[in-house]
Image: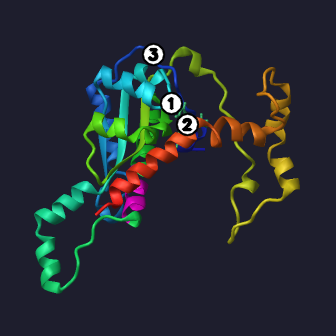
Amino acid sequence: MNDTLQLLLNRKSVRAYEDREISAETKDLLLQATLRAPTAGNMMLYSIIEVADQAAKDTLAQTCDNQPFIARAPLVLLFLADYQRWFDYFVHSDVAGLCERRGEEMRRPQEGDLFLACNDALIAAQTAVVAAESLGIGSCYIGDIMENYEAHRELFQLPRYVFPICLICFGYPARSQIGRAQPPRFDRKFIVFQDRYRRLDGAEFTEMYQDLQERFHKLPNAPEGVENVGQATYVRKFGADFSKEMTRSVQAILRNWESA
Ligand SMILES: Cc1cc2nc3c(=O)[nH]c(=O)nc-3n(C[C@H](O)[C@H](O)[C@H](O)COP(=O)(O)O)c2cc1C
């Protein structure tokens, strides 16, 4: 076992932080490592906004599905899938003139470009998480940044070809976090396949969710009428209001992205 594997195996999301600043030097190391992340075509199809303004953090704590710990995080980084910078550079470079001479229509960023930029932004984000961990700094992703697009567009002045894909809170773990157990994962055989995709059947689901199901039965206050982990996850996650808002918000971003 080497130190890197140990670091990865021990990581867990941290949502409670010491009241301690992250120094400029440490932040610089974290960003240096982040910007070395692999990036499609070496184009760096992402941007990062450090949210330092406390009022903005307070807003995010509400707009990202009411998660107060966002406001208390010493470092908050917003990762943006960004095709705006390259598209602006294409315009600046008179790509339109080139296309005209070639008798072609100039492309605008489309769905494939967006997904590629999302890859770039997320790979940079996870690199930041690992770099932070190596510096003794805990982190937690906030997927809810994809909600409330209109508010976030205003707050961060996001242009059309910029998609807020994830927010990450960083901070030195509070004492309560140090010995806290990691959440379990599903058995590898349900997640990692050989050569082709394999759909799971009922017996495999029973085995896969057995531990969670046993814990579910011990819960003192399961929601009314909910009988198992599948139903509970549907109610709390997939079917919840925040998921519906995320879809509405992402559709608004896509409409904006795609409108010519
Ligand atoms: C895309 C993504 C979005 C997430 N969004 C949130 C979030 O909004 N709030 C939160 O507390 N944790 C969030 N998390 C953290 C997960 O809840 C956490 O990774 C998961 O429960 C597994 O725990 P672990 O990271 O400690 O292993 C998110 C993680 C990912 C990868």
Residue that numbered label 3 is attached to: 18
- Front position in the image: 45 or 34: 45
Q: Is mark 1 within 8 Å of ligand 1?
A: yes
- Residue at 11 percent of width and 67 percent of height: 93
Residue range (magenta): 113-121
- Residue at 17 percent of width and 79 percent of height: 99
- Residue at 51 percent of width and 20 percent of height: 16
Label 1: how many Cα within 10 Å (few below 14, some 14–19, many 20+): some
Three-letter amino acid code at the position of disc 1: Asp
Label 2's element? helix
**How far across and down, in percent of the image, does residue 226 sit?**
80, 34
Three-letter amino acid code at the position of disc 3: Glu
- Residue at 40 percent of width and 55 percent of height: 254
Q: Is residue 114 magenta?
A: yes
Callout 1–callout 2 Cβ contact below 8 Å: yes
- Front position in the image: 178 or 5: 178
Three-letter amino acid code at the position of disc 2: Phe
Give the left or right position of residue 67, taking residue 40 as reference. right
Query: Can residue 114 be seen here?
Result: yes
Tell me how far mark 1 sits from mark 3, CA to CA.
23 Å
Of badges 1 and 3, the one in the foreground is 1
Residue that numbered label 2 is attached to: 242
Residue that numbered label 1 is attached to: 65
Query: Can residue 74 be seen here?
Result: no
